[in-house]
Image (cartoon, grey):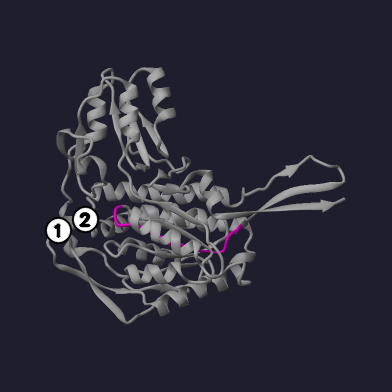
């Protein structure tokens, strides 16, 4: 489908920008650090956005801790069905304000058609994880009859959620929905290049009946993120961003004085797309190219063949002779977030999906990530999963119980 420019009703000069300050303990608060939010299309100033200070970070994390189970807060005593209903209500509010959220997403440079699709996906994500809220369960074990053996699945606590600029609202939803469904509290740091949609999401949260402090949003830069990751009351970190910064986050979490903290890291990617000679080429081209600028006959060692490019650039490498060669070349990448293959041959499909080292493999389609399928990488693309039931594992702690009968 060809790219269509935003209609005049979506002009960036008339974006519905209402919220530009940190959202802490149920309200938007002023702070001392401000920055100009620049329109990427023409470099004009769209708004003045405040960046959360270390003091703001401390207040937000303490509010999240106090609201949750560990701090003895009200959220920790909510029935799971109430959490379910709150997430469903939030999804309804997002759906009602799809146009507003989509317009705010375009402030970071995203086309309006893509932005609307992202918002629609976010609504489905919250509805999907709402269904998990009152279906969390452990296991029982039929072992020694002298004991009752079982497991409990419990919330981890305060979750620091850090997102990147390419999918700001979608990434926030991937992380926030399962975290809340499991009974955690969250502090979200949206990207400095695109914080507006996440701040509006905080506004929608304020319309819910959930206790203040359960959801906090801190617009900010690297200083804000570092203060959040290092805070002693943060129990879990989920980060999406570059491999370089992801390594630093993991190291900081591992060396925390209060003990190592679990991390979910969704880092860089360079998805190999294998198009076999028996593929439906028209569909493959439509799936792959979109609005990209195409570089043909690229050497495997070229920079654009190896490194992630945040822009509409596609590197078409030299042809392969066998599927084994294609798999070997695909696996030569240091990344392993996702991959795709287009072919009509079942054996080729089976070989590729088994042998390609990636967290997700698309077959005869591309870039579709339904909420029930886990998404996360291997190698330098990180570890842990967003979406799917596997995300529930990321935001819960399993406790084993052995009780004498």
Element type at marker 2?
A: loop
The residue positioned 46% from the left and 73% from the top of the image is: 60
Q: Position of residue 125 (x, y in %)?
A: 44, 48
- Asked if residue 88 can be seen in this view, the reply is no
Position of the N terminus by quadrant = top left
Please determine whether, in this image, residue 363 is positioned above or below residue 61: above
Element type at marker 1?
A: loop
**Picture disc at residue 109:** 2
Is-magenta flag for residue 165? yes
Displayed quadrant of residue 290: top left
Relative depth, front residue between 111 and 223:
223
Numbered marks: total: 2
Relative depth, front residue between 313 and 242:
242
**Picture disc at residue 41:** 1
Q: Position of residue 304 (x, y in %)?
A: 20, 43
Asked whether the residues under the numbered discs 1 and 2 touch, taking CB atoms below 8 Å apart as contact, a structural biologist would say: yes
- Asked if residue 190 can be seen in this view, the reply is yes
- Cα–Cα span, label 1 and label 2: 7 Å
Which residues, given as a range, are shown in magenta? 155-166
Query: Considering only order in the chain, which callout, 2 or 1, is on the residue closer to the N terminus?
Result: 1
């Amino acid at each position: 489908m060809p790219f269509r420019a935003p209609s005049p009703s979506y002009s960036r000069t008339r974006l519905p920008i209402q919220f530009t300050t940190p959202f802490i303990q149920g309200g938007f608060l002023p702070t001392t650090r401000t920055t100009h939010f620049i329109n990427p299309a023409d470099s004009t100033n769209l708004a003045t956005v405040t960046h959360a200070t270390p003091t703001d970070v401390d207040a937000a994390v303490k509010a999240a801790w106090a609201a949750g189970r560990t701090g003895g807060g009200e959220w920790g005593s909510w029935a799971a069905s109430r959490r379910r209903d709150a997430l469903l209500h939030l999804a309804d509010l997002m759906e009602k304000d799809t146009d507003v959220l989509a317009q705010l997403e375009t402030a970071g440079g995203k086309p309006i058609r893509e932005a609307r699709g992202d918002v629609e996906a976010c609504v489905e994500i919250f509805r999907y994880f709402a269904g998990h809220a009152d279906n969390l369960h452990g296991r029982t074990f039929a072992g020694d009859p002298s004991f009752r053996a079982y497991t409990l699945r419990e919330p981890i606590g305060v979750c620091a959620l850090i997102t990147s600029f390419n999918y700001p609202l979608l990434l926030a939803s991937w992380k926030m929905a399962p975290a809340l469904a499991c009974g955690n509290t969250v502090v979200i740091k949206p990207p400095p290049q695109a914080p507006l949609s996440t701040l509006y999401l905080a506004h929608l949260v304020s319309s819910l009946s959930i206790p203040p402090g359960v959801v906090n949003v801190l617009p900010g830069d690297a200083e804000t993120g570092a203060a959040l990751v290092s805070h002693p009351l943060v129990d879990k970190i989920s980060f999406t961003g570059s491999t370089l910064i992801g390594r630093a986050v993991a190291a900081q979490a591992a060396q925390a004085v209060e003990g190592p903290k679990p991390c979910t890291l969704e880092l860089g990617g360079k998805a190999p797309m294998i198009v076999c000679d028996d593929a439906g080429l028209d569909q493959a081209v439509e799936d792959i190219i979109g609005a990209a600028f195409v570089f043909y006959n690229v050497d495997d060692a070229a920079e654009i063949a190896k490194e992630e490019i945040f822009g509409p650039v596609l590197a078409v490498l030299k042809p392969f002779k066998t599927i084994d060669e294609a798999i070997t070349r695909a696996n030569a990448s240091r990344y392993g977030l996702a991959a795709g293959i287009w072919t009509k041959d079942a054996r080729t499909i089976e070989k590729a999906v088994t042998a390609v080292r990636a967290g997700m493999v698309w077959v005869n389609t591309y870039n579709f990530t339904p909420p029930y399928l886990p998404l996360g990488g291997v190698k330098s693309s990180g570890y842990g999963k967003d979406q799917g039931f596997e995300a529930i594992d990321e935001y819960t702690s399993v406790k084993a119980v052995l009780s004498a009968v």
